[in-house]
Amino acid sequence: MHNPVTAHSAIGPVEEILRRAGGVSAHTAFPTVDELHAAMEDLRARRPDLVTSERIGTSRLGEPIRRYRVGSGALSALIVGGVHPNEPIGSLTVLHLVEQLIADDDFRGRLDTTWHIVPCADPDGMRLNEGWFATPPIGSATRASSSVRLRTSRSSGRSPSPTRTPTSTG
Ligand SMILES: [Zn+2]
């Protein structure tokens, strides 16, 4: 009997993982909440046969929280970006994942997964961080948790936008 974990969860050899990661274009900024959702809508418009969207909730300040469903595989996966809104790399990663899933039928088919993707779980908190998204401190993508400290230590002369401390650690 085959091992279902191995059969369904292997995303490919290390070489493929490195190739896919290396294919990600360079970024100098993180998307704002509006840019993030606009980019997701662009992807949905590109493959409406694969991507659907629905509102699954409302933030405390009244913003919609959206869930995108990608594909219709046998497995289910939940991917949530922006859980800690000062760590926007998760939302950017979500965009790249969806781009790969809709552009590569073989990749999507091998994963055999229905993807439930929340690009931004906390739009209220993310908006409080958007002031530095266009000019993130160097290294913020890999040291996201220190981005607030790095930002406030910059000597740009600009007032830092308000930042909320996440209510949980991670
Ligand atoms: Zn975190």
Image (cartoon, helix red, strand yellow):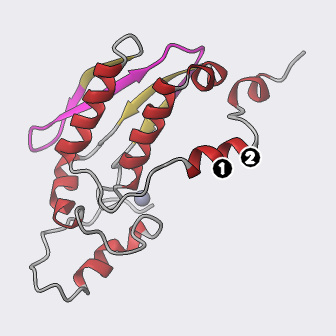
The residue at 48%/37% (across/down) is 97
Quadrant location of the N terminus?
A: top right
- Is residue 49 found left or right of 130 in the rendered image? right
Q: Which residue is drawn at 27% across and 28% down?
A: 42
Q: Are marks 2 and 1 in contact (CB under 8 Å)?
A: yes
CA gap, disc 2 and disc 1: 6 Å
| Residue 93, percent from left and from top | 44, 46
Ligand 1 located in image quadrant: bottom left
Specify the amino acid type for callout 1. Answer: Leu
Left or right placement of residue 84 versus residue 26 in this view = left
* Range of magenta residues: 56-77
Provide residue 63's location: percent of width, then percent of height: 13, 38
Assess mark 1: CB under 8 A from ligand 1? Answer: no
- The answer to which quarter of the image holds residue 39 is top left
| Within-10-Å neighbours for mark 2: few <14, some 14–19, many 20+ | few
The residue shown at (12%, 70%) is 161
Q: Residue 85 placed where, x, y %?
A: 29, 56
Residue 14: numbered disc: 2
Q: How many marks?
A: 2
Residue at position x 20%, y 46% in the image: 33
Q: Is mark 2 on a helix, strand or loop?
A: helix
Residue under label 1: 18
Please determine whether, in this image, residue 125 is positioned above or below residue 114: below
Q: Residue furthest top?
A: 49
- Residue 73, image x, y percentages: 56, 15
- 28 up-or-down from 139: above or below: above
Vertical relation: 28 (above or below) 94: below
